Amino acid sequence: MRAKISYAITAAVLVVYFVLVGSRGVMLIQSGTVLTVTFGVAVLILPVIGLWFLWKNTQFVRRANALAAQLDAEGGLPVDELKRTPSGRIDRDSADEVFARRKAETQAAPDDWRSWFRLAVAYHDARDTPRARKAMQRAIALHDGKTVEA
C-alpha cells in the first residue's frame, strides 16, 4: 500500500509540474515574437512527453498488478523464499538460486505468462530492473494474447 501512495503522490507532483511548465509555454507563445513562440512550443513539448511517459508507466503498473491479483487468486503467486542479510537486504546467492529455477521454468514453458511473471519477480529480486520490466512486459503481452517476439 505504501508503494501505491508513493506512486500516487509522485504522479500528482509531476502533473502539477507539467501544468506549471505548460503555462509558461503558453505565456511564451502569447508574447508573440518569433523567438518566444518557438521557445513556447518547445517548452510545451516537454509536458506532453512527460504525460505520455507517466500514462504508459501507469498502464504498465496497473496491468502488472492485475496479473499479480489473478495469479494470487489462482494460488500461483511466487512465495518469498529468499534469505536476507541481518539488515534485511536480499542475499545475492539466494536470489541467484531462485532466479535459476525461475529461468528454467520459463524456458520449459515459454508461452505461459505465469512463468514470465515469476521470472520478472526473480529479476527484480536479483536487482536487474531492466530485465524485470521486459519479462513483465512479456507476461502482460502473453496474458493479453498478443504475439511476442523472442
Image (spheres, rainbow, N blue to C red):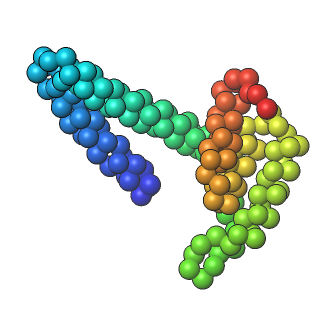
Residue at left offset 65%, top offset 75%: 84
Residue at left offset 40%, top offset 48%: 7
Q: Position of residue 69 (x, y in %)?
A: 59, 44
Position of residue 56 in the picture relative to residue 36 (left or right):
right
Split into 4 quadrants, where in the image is the N terminus? bottom left
Q: Is residue 73 visible?
A: no
Foreground residue, 128 or 68?
Answer: 128
Number of labels in the image equals 0
Residue 48 against residue 89 in the figure, above or below: above
Position of residue 35 in the picture relative to residue 122 (left or right):
left
Split into 4 quadrants, where in the image is the C terminus? top right
Residue farthest bottom in this picture: 86
Residue 13 against residue 53 in the figure, above or below: below
Figure quadrant of residue 13: top left
Figure quadrant of residue 80: bottom right
Q: Is residue 45 visible?
A: yes
Residue at left offset 42%, top offset 58%: 2
Q: Position of residue 94 (x, y in %)?
A: 74, 69
Figure quadrant of residue 92: bottom right
Residue at left offset 76%, top offset 44%: 115
Residue 30 against residue 67 in the figure, above or below: above
Q: Position of residue 12 (x, y in %)?
A: 30, 43
Residue farthest right in this picture: 108
Position of residue 10 in the picture relative to residue 149 (left or right):
left
Residue 69 against residue 23 in the figure, above or below: below
